[in-house]
Amino acid sequence: MNVSFEFYRGDTYERTFALLWSKEITNVYFTVKQTSDDKRPIIQKKLGDGINLVDVTEDGNVYLLTIDSEDTEKLLPNTAYSFDIEVLSNNLRQTPIVGTLTLKEDYTRRKDEK
């Protein structure tokens, strides 16, 4: 599944997503990079650290992804960053969600908040 996230640089962003999975999930990763060849992620969240299970339904497990304001504060606006959500189930590793994250330009920064 290909999705897009768009929000203001430096804002906290929350979004739910569902995973229909027949096996026990041992971890979920959300990783943002400029290109897939980058050695280090720009942002990475994992189960229990930015990704939390919030519901279990017939359509799958529902997770809440939280991107903190500090995660995007220094990133370039109007730039498309790539991300994926990868699921681990013991030795099984799959990537059910990929997409782009685009930050809109903001004007009030932490240094302006007095």
Image: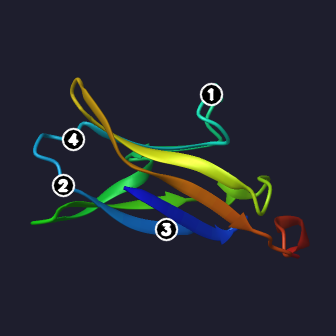
Res. 20 mark? 2
The amino acid beneath tag 3 is Glu
Q: Which of 99 and 110 is in front in this view?
A: 99
**Cα–Cα gap, marks 4 and 3:** 21 Å
Give the number of the mark in front: 2 or 4. Answer: 2
Residue tagged by mark 3? 14
Residue tagged by mark 4? 25
Q: Which of 37 and 42 is in front in this view?
A: 37
The amino acid beneath tag 4 is Ile
Query: Can you give x and y, in whole percent of width and height, for residue 48 in the image?
Result: 37, 47
Decide: few, some or many residues near mark 4? Use Cα within 10 Å; few <14, some 14-19, many ≥20.
some
Tell me which corner region of the image, top left, top right, bottom left or bottom right, holds residue 63: bottom left
Give the number of the mark in front: 2 or 1. Answer: 1
Residue 113, placed above or below residue 21: below
Residue tagged by mark 1? 37
Give the number of the mark in front: 3 or 2. Answer: 2
Res. 7 mark? none
